[in-house]
């Protein structure tokens, strides 16, 4: 499971099952195993022993959501405070967008752009015309255009450290 929003992930899984006409509970349970990572595979093995492959899909679904849903604030806090630290501005922006959408799939476009941009350094934000951003891809284009500033900042830091 790659998403931190368990219910969203489960809904997407069920939508895919409908798309591919997978309706039998046993088939869903077997396919579900193929999409799990290490931690979830241990859970799957336990459920297989407790419930068996012949049990109802709804029971598996409810148990999975109950086990893996984030009920606290830690994932929200991490997402909202996630800021650019080092590396590529574009990589930061893409990761921040993913985190935000995992927390709130139906966030409006302007808020999404603002929350991504606010984690950029001020010297980068100040070079972006907020009014020109119609879509997140426009922000991506702008931060991509400003990638050279990361190198300049690193070079400037290195020179300052050499002088000290």
Image (cartoon, grey):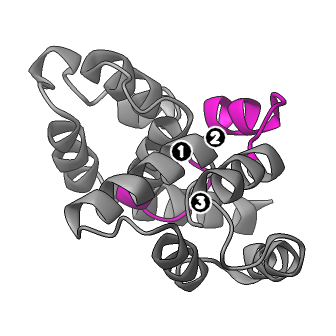
Estimate how packed mark 1 is, as few (under 14), some (14 to 19) or many (20 or more) residues with alpha carbons within 10 Å: many
Viewer-nearest residue: 139 or 108: 108
Secondary element at image label 1: helix
Q: Residue furthest front?
A: 54
Query: Residue at label 3?
Result: 57
Q: Are marks 1 and 2 in contact (CB under 8 Å)?
A: yes
Report whether 65 appears left or right of 83.
right
Secondary element at image label 3: helix
In percent of width and height, residue 62 lies at 70, 46
Disc 1 versus disc 2: distance between alpha carbons?
A: 9 Å
In percent of width and height, residue 141 lies at 16, 48
Secondary element at image label 2: loop
Query: Residue at label 1?
Result: 99
- Residue at screen point 24% across, 29% down: 128
- Residue at screen point 42% across, 33% down: 105
User: Is 53 a magenta residue?
Assistant: no
In percent of width and height, residue 45 lies at 81, 83
Residue 14 image label: none
Report whether 74 appears left or right of 145.
right
């Amino acid at each position: 499971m790659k998403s931190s929003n368990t219910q969203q992930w489960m809904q997407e899984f069920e939508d895919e099952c409908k798309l591919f006409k997978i309706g039998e509970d046993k088939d869903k349970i077997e396919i579900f195993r193929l999409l799990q990572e290490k931690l979830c595979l241990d859970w799957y093995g336990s459920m297989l022993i407790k419930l068996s492959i012949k049990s109802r899909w709804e029971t598996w679904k409810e148990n999975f959501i109950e086990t893996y849903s984030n009920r606290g604030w830690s994932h929200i806090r991490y997402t909202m405070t996630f800021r650019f630290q080092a590396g590529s501005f574009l990589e930061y922006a893409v990761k921040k967008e993913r985190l935000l959408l995992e927390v709130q799939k139906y966030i409006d476009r302007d808020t999404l752009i603002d929350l991504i941009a606010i984690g950029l350094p001020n010297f980068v934000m100040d070079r972006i015309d907020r009014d020109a951003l119609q879509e997140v891809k426009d922000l991506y284009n702008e931060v991509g255009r400003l990638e050279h500033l990361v190198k300049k900042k690193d070079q400037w830091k290195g020179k300052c450290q050499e002088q000290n």
